Image (cartoon, rainbow, N blue to C red):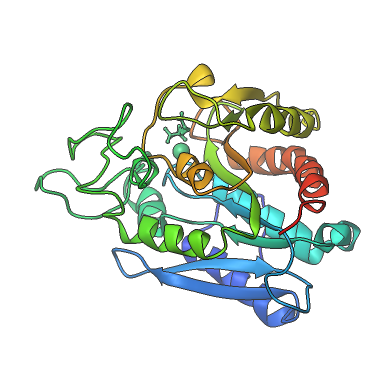
Amino acid sequence: KMDWTSYHRLDDIYGYLNYLAATYPNLVELINIGTSYENRTLYLVRISNATAPDTQPAVWIDGGFHAREWISPALATYIIQQIVEEPANAKLLNNIDWYIMPVVNPDGYEYSHVKSRLWRKTRSKTSSARCIGVDPNRNFDFKWGGAGSSSNPCSEVFKGSKAYSEVETLAYSKFITSKSNQIKLYLSLHSCGQKLLIPWGYNREYPSNFDDMMTLGKCAAFKFKLFKYGVGNKVDLLYRAAGNAADWAKSIGIEYVYTVELPTTSFIVPAYNILPIVQDFFPAIDVFATKIATLKV
Ligand code: 0X9
Ligand code: ZN
């Protein structure tokens, strides 16, 4: 079982995903998309009550790109729990498949628990003996190596030796590509700063449906009561970050793409704030789902 009164280690999170798949076999499928650098399994769940596979629009949600941003796996698991185990949310299963990956960077996540609380990157070896890890959110094959990324292995925004140098980002991109016709909404959960960020992030440019993404994003953010979120373009609201995952998701044709910077204004969020943050966020999921359910695959 799971709770949102403390942060959980990877084994607990995976144990919960396993429990859900075993308890609700007609609803939850555990999907293994590969293995991390340090040999941890890369799991996500598919939640769907559809009888025919892959015929309805899908939502992608991920967390745990950056190791220290513990509130993001917490929200991802909360969303899974609410969709699967809360009967009042059954309507979220109408006409939508959900793909939710709570911990994209499990090696970093565990390292931030046992060794270094503010670890951000993966844990792979680099060309520098002293510096470990790649920023997974600079490792994607769209404008890879551009502004806001670094070729220095010691940098926190190290882009890697090439796009998809990291097994985690490669497995992630392969899975999403395989579902790219179906996935209509993409949410990548990060912290911190309370923002819904819209591509592009490699440059101060807007995708053709930017206004639609703004409208839906503002509609969703209108649901937040406890924490106020800014909604806007990534470069306008934050900074350039070429090679980030959301830009890549947009580049392969996903219609609605957001990077979410969760509360608060610090990466370190006390455990007593987990529940307020995730409960405050969840109503936005309903707004997104209502929109996505109407789209054609
Ligand atoms: O730098 C990042 O990867 C994200 N911020 S975080 O503090 N969670 O590390 C922001 C990525 C969003 N994209 C752009 N700003 N372009
Ligand atoms: Zn982040």
Q: Nearer the viewer, residue 5 or 169?
A: 169
Q: Nearer the viewer, residue 3 or 167?
A: 167
The residue shown at (30%, 56%) is 166
Q: Check the image and name the residue furthest to the right.
A: 88
Q: Nearer the viewer, residue 199 or 13?
A: 199
Q: Is residue 116 left or right of residue 192?
A: left
x%, y% of residue 111? Answer: 34, 53
Q: Is residue 166 left or right of residue 117?
A: left
Q: Where the N terminus falls, by quadrant?
A: bottom right
In the rendered image of this protein, does residue 232 appear above or below residue 164? above
Q: Check the image and name the residue furthest to the top.
A: 236
Based on the displayed image, in which of its 4 quarters is residue 230 positioned? Answer: top right
Q: Nearer the viewer, residue 199 or 113?
A: 199
x%, y% of residue 221? Answer: 74, 30
Q: Where the C terminus falls, by quadrant?
A: bottom right
Residue 161 seen from this side: yes
The residue shown at (55%, 65%) is 44
Residue 6 seen from this side: no
Q: Is residue 116 left or right of residue 109?
A: left
x%, y% of residue 263? Answer: 61, 31
